[in-house]
Amino acid sequence: MPNNDNTMTSDKKITINTFAEFQEKVLKLKGVFAYRGQKDKDWGIESGAYRRLQGNVNTDLLKYTNEIIGKAKNYTQEVGNKSDLDLLGDLQHFGCATPLIDFSYNALTALWFACEDSTKDGKLVCLKTNEIERFLKVSREDKKQSLNQILSFTIRETGSYKFGLWQPPLNNNRIIKQDSLFIFTETGKIADTEFAVTFIIPKGAKPAIRTALDHLCNITQTSIYPDFYGFANSNNADNEYQELPIDELTEQADQYFQEGKYLKAKPYYEDALKTAEKEEDTAAIAKCQNNVGFILDELGDPKKAIEYYELALASDLSSYGEADPKVAILRNNIGGAWHALGEFEKAIEYYELALASDLNSYGEAHPNVATYRNNLGMAWKALGKPKKAIEYYELALESDLNSYGEAHPNVATRRNNLGGAWQALGELEKAIGYYELALASGLKSYGEAHPEVATYRNNLGGAWHALGEFEKAIEYYELALESDLKSYGEAH
């Protein structure tokens, strides 16, 4: 009948269990086809008007359609100068029961509809449309005729048509995305025997096919209904709320985190953490716990941060063992939080563990090793032991010089810290020497207008001040002020 492939009869039904199987079978169809997918295989292929009129005394489709068109024109001024057929298409678009039946020239779009509702078997029908003797194809000129003539197939003087076919103008995204066309018949329905093939999609196969349509073809609820109405409909109370997956949550959180927008990042990490716990994804759990801890630390709540860091540490120790860089980073973070709380001995304990772990992992010449030694220096200085601090600062400086060379911010920071430690020991000239080196390195790294450069000059001013060299001190203080005015302005 409508198919030239002798292996397929007009009433043939084929059960499809996979996306690949559907593709293979559809490619065997010969001719031009319109496709319609329905979530329940037991439903007939019927127009909304046909279904609405069942059980009524008046079942005349033409009379009903004229009534609907008349009411629509009186209901709103939005109709404008549209033809009756265009108005009928708009009514169909917004869910009105009309004699039009939605089809698509895209088999995959129809398959998406057939895979709705995984509690029932679905079906997809294939109607061959290039048999010109059976199809009245409505043209742009035909729309000037009365709707009665179009729907009753009397706009042509000759021909005995079984189906009407109208492809509406491409004036909205949904019609474009769904590759839509409308089929109509005098009865408002199409018998099963008219289809070249009917594909049956078992309910158990629907979720996997839907996933394949999404991942391989980007056919989703959003692409099928790319308008505001579609968005609202897909988010009504009948549709299950789909939570964002971990990777999307963490991607958004990471973006805010890297931009320093911690208050925006935090709820995304917290949601990702809940999802990761539900899915027992230990790597994601530890990452989210660490990042929430870091944010709490930055927002001034180191005590709460430690709770999250400790949970992340326990998870990573269980997953990776002692000799993993993630474990060292977490211990360093815990040390930093204890440092912020003024618990310097506890901070040192964690910094030492972090240092020992990364020495095993990387050896001496690694930036993390330098960072942990610098942090140990800061903790020892805060404990009032600048000599001990100097030992760690010097090792950190040596390591960073090997890693980066002179013109690097870390090198400037280490030298500034050494200057501070020597100043705490009363060795002001040594302190000035390191401050000067820090300033030179900072200028190479940042240039004049940078807060760190201003800090180094202010520290130099402080050291010269302590030496009683007030004019030199003023010189550096003024340069520091000038730099910060450029960076921040007056109100800082």
Image (cartoon, rainbow, N blue to C red):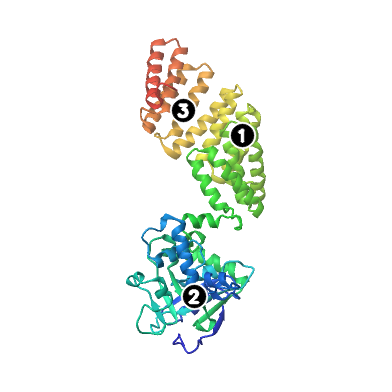
Residue 170, quarter of the rendered image: bottom left
Q: Which residue is mark 3?
A: 415
Q: Quadrant of the C terminus?
A: top left
Q: Are marks 3 and 1 in contact (CB under 8 Å)?
A: no
Tell me the CA gap for discs 3 and 1: 22 Å
Of the two numbered discs 2 and 1 on the same chain, state the one appearing first in sequence: 2
Task: For mark 3, give the secondary structure.
Answer: helix
Tell me the CA gap for discs 2 and 1: 58 Å
Q: Are marks 2 and 1 in contact (CB under 8 Å)?
A: no
Q: Is residue 209 left or right of residue 416?
A: right
Position of residue 361 measured from the top left corner of the image (x, y, whole percent): 57, 46
> 295 and 366: which one is in front?
295
Q: Residue at x 42, y 64 (%)?
A: 87
Task: For mark 2, give the secondary structure.
Answer: helix
Q: Residue at x 59, y 30 (%)?
A: 300
Position of residue 213 measured from the top left corner of the image (x, y, whole percent): 51, 66
Of the two numbered discs 3 and 1 on the same chain, state the one appearing first in sequence: 1
Position of residue 15 measured from the top left corner of the image (x, y, whole percent): 58, 79
Quick one: label 2, few (<14), some, or many (20+) residues within 10 Å? few
Q: Amino acid at mark 1?
A: Gly
Quick one: label 3, few (<14), some, or many (20+) residues within 10 Å? many
Q: Residue at x 53, y 68 (%)?
A: 113
